[in-house]
């Protein structure tokens, strides 16, 4: 998964788990950037009566860098509060919920959004409602409208949304984690077994999304809206984190539990699959607690990726050129740790300087594509991953092809990729997405999902 269960400790704390991150120039409002930060992965839609929600004791943050030192320049902090109307019932809702303020919604959440820039804190939204769980056709009829009502205005024409969404990441996890069973040559696997059709393992599952639509001028270092792709000011870096207080004291009465001390970061996410695939298991928890500007400590996993060594071993004869390539992977370092310098890909640069840092880099001067390609830059679409990331981008296939050697020639013209590097895929069709903010689709409801499964 992109980052759904990527480290041992955060896998035990899903409410603080940064699951996915997207950042792209909004195709409906090209003067804006939309950032989607997902948490609380792998939600069964029918998980009542205690439906999934954000944590009151978690500080959720979206960070933006806009300088060459890759340190955070702008942060949007979200803090949530849970409310219970009737403390004498076990029910999440006591009747149909037809509005965010319906008294039938027994348990609901509100939140505050704080912008931190240049040491100045500004509350840009306060006491606004989280979209509730999509329970089923009797409890939450007209859910799409409930979700629309949970989109709240921010200064400068921006917007924020918080609530459950259908998980937009798509991949055949069952095949991937079964010794990298990959299409279209799974029959050539060293431990071949009868082939089965690809399955999107995350289909039918939900996630909690923080969606921000922000003016480009609110994210650049000088408040400009750059139009020139080559302008260094046009590149921003995005990453997301979740933090908890350093100490929690439990009381005999849970109502008296308390948290103390400074905030301690417990998860983060920039590029998809970074911690999942490129960081050794015993260092994954340390990566989650570190800052992007310190990622030189994790660069060895990028320069000598384990997957690139496994592919020739698991598919004998399929990746002969990759097997013979022993140089450090400068292509992956450029894509994931520094951004692409000017001249590597015609018409694109998202270089943030020599400091190695896992950031989702976005050149805001690249216009949204009229006909987006799920393969992003590999498909000739410069508005897609690894220039930011959109929900439609097939990041698993893109990164897998890069790990298979397809991108080595960008920095080493003496290398010719194996034919298989341009074919490898899990061949999973993407889910449907909304055409407008917040772009990720309406969450699955428990009644319909499990009724369909039973039939």
Image (cartoon, rainbow, N blue to C red):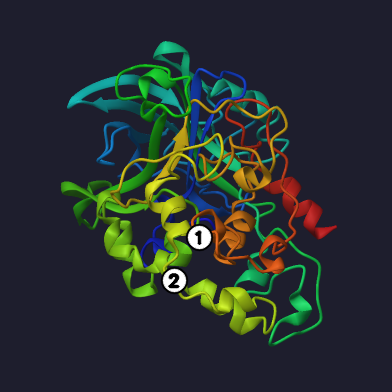
> Seen in the image, is 327 located left or right of residue 282?
right
Determine whether label 1 and label 2 are within 8 Å by CB: yes
In the rendered view, would you say 322 is above or below 133?
below
> Badge 1: few (under 14), some or many (20 or more) residues near its Cα, within 10 Å?
few
Residue receiving disc 2:
327
What residue is rendered at 55% in x and 19% in y? 30
Q: Quadrant of the C terminus?
A: bottom right
State which mark lies toward you, 1 or 2.
1
Q: Looking at the image, which residue sits at the far front? A: 414
For marks 1 and 2, give the CA distance. 10 Å
> Badge 2: few (under 14), some or many (20 or more) residues near its Cα, within 10 Å?
few
Residue receiving disc 1:
412
Front-lying residue, 28 or 344: 344
Give the image location of residue 279, x and y in percent: 39, 67
Give the image location of residue 156, x and y in percent: 42, 12
In the rendered view, would you say 451 is above or below 421?
above
In the rendered view, would you say 170 is above or below 65?
below
């Amino acid at each position: 998964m992109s980052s759904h269960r990527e480290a041992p400790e955060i896998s035990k704390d899903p409410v603080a788990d940064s699951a996915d991150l997207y950042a792209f120039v909004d195709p409906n409002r090209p003067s804006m950037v939309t950032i989607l930060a997902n948490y609380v992965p792998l939600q069964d839609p029918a998980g009542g009566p205690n439906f999934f929600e954000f944590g009151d004791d978690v500080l959720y943050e979206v960070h933006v860098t806009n300088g060459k030192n890759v340190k955070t320049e702008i942060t949007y902090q979200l803090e949530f509060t849970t409310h219970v109307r009737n403390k004498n019932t076990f029910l999440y809702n006591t009747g149909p919920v037809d509005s965010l303020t319906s008294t039938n919604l027994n348990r609901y959440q509100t939140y505050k959004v704080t912008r931190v820039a240049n040491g100045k804190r500004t509350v840009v939204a306060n006491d606004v409602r989280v979209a509730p769980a999509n329970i089923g056709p009797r409890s939450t009829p007209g859910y799409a409208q409930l979700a629309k009502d949970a989109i709240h205005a921010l200064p400068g024409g921006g917007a924020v949304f918080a609530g459950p969404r259908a998980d937009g990441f798509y991949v055949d996890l069952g095949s991937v984690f079964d010794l990298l069973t990959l299409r279209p040559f799974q029959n050539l696997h060293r431990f071949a077994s009868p082939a089965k059709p690809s399955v999107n393992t995350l289909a039918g599952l939900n996630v909690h999304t923080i969606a921000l639509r922000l003016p480009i001028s609110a994210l650049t270092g000088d408040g400009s809206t750059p139009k020139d792709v080559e302008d260094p000011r046009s590149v921003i870096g995005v990453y997301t984190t979740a933090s908890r207080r350093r100490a929690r004291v439990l009381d005999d009465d849970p109502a008296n539990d308390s948290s103390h001390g400074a905030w301690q970061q417990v998860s983060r996410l920039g590029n998809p699959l970074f911690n999942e695939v490129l960081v050794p298991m015993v260092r994954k928890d340390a990566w989650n607690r570190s800052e992007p500007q310190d990622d030189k400590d994790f660069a060895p996993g990028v320069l000598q990726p384990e997957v690139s060594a496994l592919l020739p071993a698991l598919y004998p004869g399929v990746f002969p050129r990759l097997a013979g390539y022993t140089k450090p992977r400068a292509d992956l370092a450029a894509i994931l740790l520094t951004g692409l310098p000017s001249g590597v890909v015609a018409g694109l640069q998202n270089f943030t300087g020599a400091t190695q840092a896992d950031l989702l880099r976005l050149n805001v001067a690249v216009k949204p594509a009229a006909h987006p390609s799920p393969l992003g830059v590999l498909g000739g679409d410069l508005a897609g991953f690894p220039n930011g990331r959109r929900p439609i981008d097939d990041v698993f296939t893109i990164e897998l092809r890069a790990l298979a050697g397809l991108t080595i020639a960008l920095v080493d013209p003496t290398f010719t990729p194996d034919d298989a590097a341009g074919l490898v895929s899990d061949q999973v069709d993407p889910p449907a997405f909304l055409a407008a903010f917040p772009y990720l689709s309406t969450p699955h409801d428990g009644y319909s999902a499990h009724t369909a499964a039973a039939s």
